[in-house]
Image (cartoon, grey):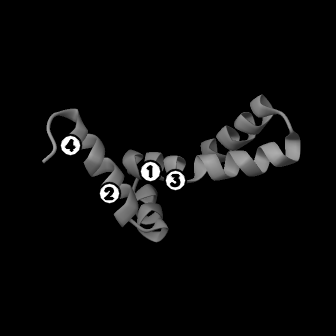
Amino acid sequence: MFYGSNYSWGAVVLTQTLLSDKELIALLKEGNAAAYTMIYNRYFDELYVHAYQRLRDREEAQEVVHELFSGI
């Protein structure tokens, strides 16, 4: 059983896992901020690794990924 803030966190993780990218994009198109956060959390690390492999600069890689997400 979950208690306190752990329950909320667990529900968010579970929801992120259950929603497909297609469902998240549909919610994002409706202006759902939580969908944006879920997409960001789902893809930031992977995109950051790719950017870092190309740029070899941590700050620049982070900036590129943040710019990418700011365009959504």
Q: Is residue 70 left or right of residue 60?
A: left
Q: Residue 7's mark?
A: 4
Q: Earlier in the sequence, mark 1 or mark 4?
A: 4
Name the residue located 83 percent from the left edge and 33 percent from the top edge: 57
Q: Earlier in the sequence, mark 2 or mark 1?
A: 2
Q: Are marks 3 and 1 in contact (CB under 8 Å)?
A: yes
Element on which disc 1 rests: helix
Give the amino acid at mark 2: Thr
Which residue is disc 1 drawn over?
Answer: 38
Around disc 2, counting alpha carbons within 10 Å, would you say few (fewer than 14), some (14 to 19), or many (20 or more)? Answer: few
Q: Earlier in the sequence, mark 3 or mark 2?
A: 2
Q: CA distance from mark 2 to mark 1?
A: 9 Å
Which residue is disc 3 drawn over?
Answer: 42
What is the x, y in percent for residue 50? 76, 51
Which residue is disc 2 drawn over?
Answer: 15
What is the x, y in percent for residue 30? 39, 57
